[in-house]
Amino acid sequence: MKYKKTLLILVLFLFMYGAGAGAAKIVDVFSGSPFIQKQTDNWGLGFGTEGTPPTGNVSTEELAQYDAQYLGDTTKKTIYLTFDCGYENGNTEKILDALKKHNAQGAFFIVGNFLETAPDIVKRMQTEGHLVGNHTYHHPDMSKISDLSSFRKEMDDVANLYQDITGQEMPKLYRPPQGKFSTENLKMAQQLGYHTFFWSLAYVDWYQDQQPTAEEAYQKLLPRIHPGAIVLLHATSSTNGDIMDALLTKWEELGYTFGSLEEFL
């Protein structure tokens, strides 16, 4: 009887594992604890009451196992400003001007193309005290890379070029392209000494031919701001370039201050 019960549990486990492929996590039927699957997933958020932190599709506790974060201290009205830089189209320096005016530090996650085509802006980021993080050289789906050597090359090619340009070692900050991740993806980043950063607030700002109006941006970014927010904005967005000064002012008027991702390291 005991043997049959054990066999039944094993069959149930295998069924649940197969049915859960592609989900963010499943439940270990032996311990009852959740864990991240190896299958690829997209980072996602669920929002509740206005002004409160969202829930990630993987918990802060699970992410912490791999030196990964998406949210800061939810008891403090601090915002962490992060920007993804896929290429330069004339908006990044507007953002840098606004950050300088508000004495706010940003974290810019850059790819190889940005380093190659806008080295002077990268130097400005570093000179003005911003963090420059690794968004991989070619912006692939990193969760599909199964060997550490290939994963390392995507990261090292960015870090080495950054050092050539600035003379400084690149901070060990990593953001997965497209927000796609897996357990192995996070483990490899951790093994290379990186902290992985997702986000707790973002909006659709990356389509060049469908840029939101300023009011549409405010409707997304003001009600959903929350204590400890790690905000993701795209430096390619002309809307972000135009509204950054006013947006930072509005957040300050709501009682928020701007922090640094260095606090997580």
Image: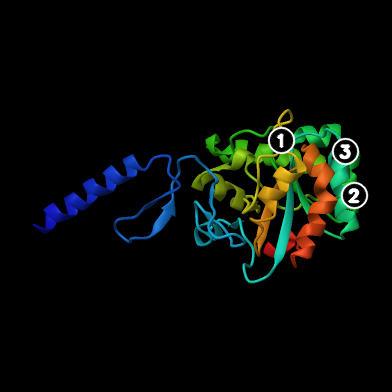
Q: Which residue is mark 1?
A: 137
Q: Earlier in the sequence, mark 2 or mark 3?
A: 2
- At x 90% / y 49%, what residue is drawn? 97
Identify the secondary structure beneath mark 1: loop
Which of the numbered marks, if any, corresponds to residue 97? 2
Three-letter amino acid code at the position of disc 2: Asp
Three-letter amino acid code at the position of disc 1: Tyr
Q: Position of residue 135 (x, y in %)?
A: 69, 42
Q: CA distance from mark 1 to mark 2?
A: 26 Å
Q: Position of residue 82 (x, y in %)?
A: 73, 51
Tally of marks: 3
Identify the secondary structure beneath mark 3: helix
Three-letter amino acid code at the position of disc 3: Pro
Q: Residue furthest front?
A: 215
Asked if the residues shown at circle 2 and circle 3 are in contact, with their CB atoms under 8 angstroms apart, the answer is no
Asked if the residues shown at circle 3 and circle 1 are in contact, with their CB atoms under 8 angstroms apart, the answer is no
Give the left or right position of residue 206, taking residue 5 as reference.
Answer: right
Q: Residues within 10 Å of mark 2 (few under 14, many from 20)?
A: some
Q: Which residue is mark 3?
A: 119
Q: Is residue 85 visible?
A: yes
Identify the secondary structure beneath mark 2: helix
- At x 54% / y 54%, what residue is drawn? 47
Q: Residues within 10 Å of mark 1 (few under 14, many from 20)?
A: many
Q: Position of residue 264 (x, y in %)?
A: 67, 63
Q: Earlier in the sequence, mark 1 or mark 2?
A: 2
Where 24 sits versus 211, above or below?
below
Q: Nearer the viewer, mark 2 or mark 3?
A: 2
